[in-house]
Amino acid sequence: MPHVFEYALLRAVPRQERGEFVNVGVLVYCAALDFLGARVHVDEERLRAIDPFLDVELLKANLDHLGISCDGNPLAGPVAKTTPGQRFRWLIAPRSTIIQTSPAHTGLTEDPEAELDHLLRALVLPPTR
C-alpha cells in the first residue's frame, strides 16, 4: 500500500547574491515508515562553471554532515536526539548558506529508499539519453 512521502532538493548556491544553484542532493521523509534519508551527488564541473573559486571539499563535508543528521548520528549534535520528522523540518528550514533546500513536495510510495534513488536520478544527476 502506498504511503505519503515528502521530499526536498538540496541545492548548492555558491554565490547567493547571484541566485544561481546546482541541485546536489535530495531528502526523502516518510512518516508512516519512520524513514528519513538523503542522497547526494556533487557535479564539480557544473559548480565550477558558476563559481570557479568554490571550496568543493567544504561543500562535500557539509553535505556529509547533513547525511549524518538524517541518520540521527550523535556526531550531528543536538538534532540527532529529535524524531525523523523534526530532523526533516530542521533540514529543510530556509537558510542563507551555500546549501539550501527547495520547498517540500509530496508523493506516494511503497518504497522510500527506491524513491530516493529515483529522485536522485531524475532531479540531481546529469541528464542521460
Image (cartoon, rainbow, N blue to C red):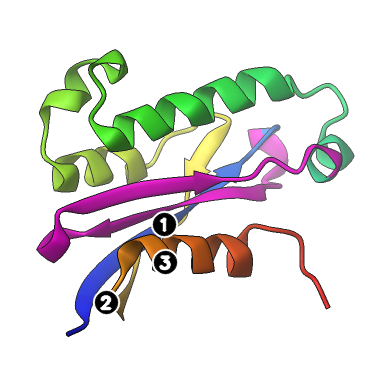
Spatial distance from mark 2 to mark 3, Cα to Cα? 9 Å
Q: Which residue is mark 3?
A: 114
Of mark 3 and mark 1, the one earlier in the sequence is: 1
Name the residue type under label 1: Ala
Residue segment shown in magenta: 16-45
Residue 15 point in image, percent of width and height: 70, 32
Q: Which residue is mark 2?
A: 110
Name the residue type under label 3: Ala
Among the 4 quarters of the image, the one containing residue 48: top right
Among the 4 quarters of the image, the one containing residue 5: bottom left
Residue 38 point in image, percent of width and height: 42, 46
- Which is more foreground, mark 3 or mark 1? 3
Among the 4 quarters of the image, the one containing residue 14: top right
In the rendered image, the quadrant that contains the N terminus is bottom left
Q: Which numbered tag is attached to residue 8?
A: 1
| SS class, disc 3 | helix
Contact (CB < 8 A) between labels 1 and 2? no
In the rendered image, the quadrant that contains the C terminus is bottom right
Name the residue located 82 percent from the left edge and 40 percent from the top edge.
50
Q: Which numbered tag is attached to residue 120?
A: none
Name the residue type under label 2: Glu
**Is 33 one of the magenta-colored residues?**
yes
Examine the rendered structure and indicate whether residue 102 appears above or below residue 106: above
Q: Residues within 10 Å of mark 3 (few under 14, many from 20)?
A: few
Spatial distance from mark 1 to mark 2, Cα to Cα? 18 Å
- Out of 76 and 18, give the one closest to the viewer: 76
Position of residue 101 in the picture relative to residue 111 (left or right): right
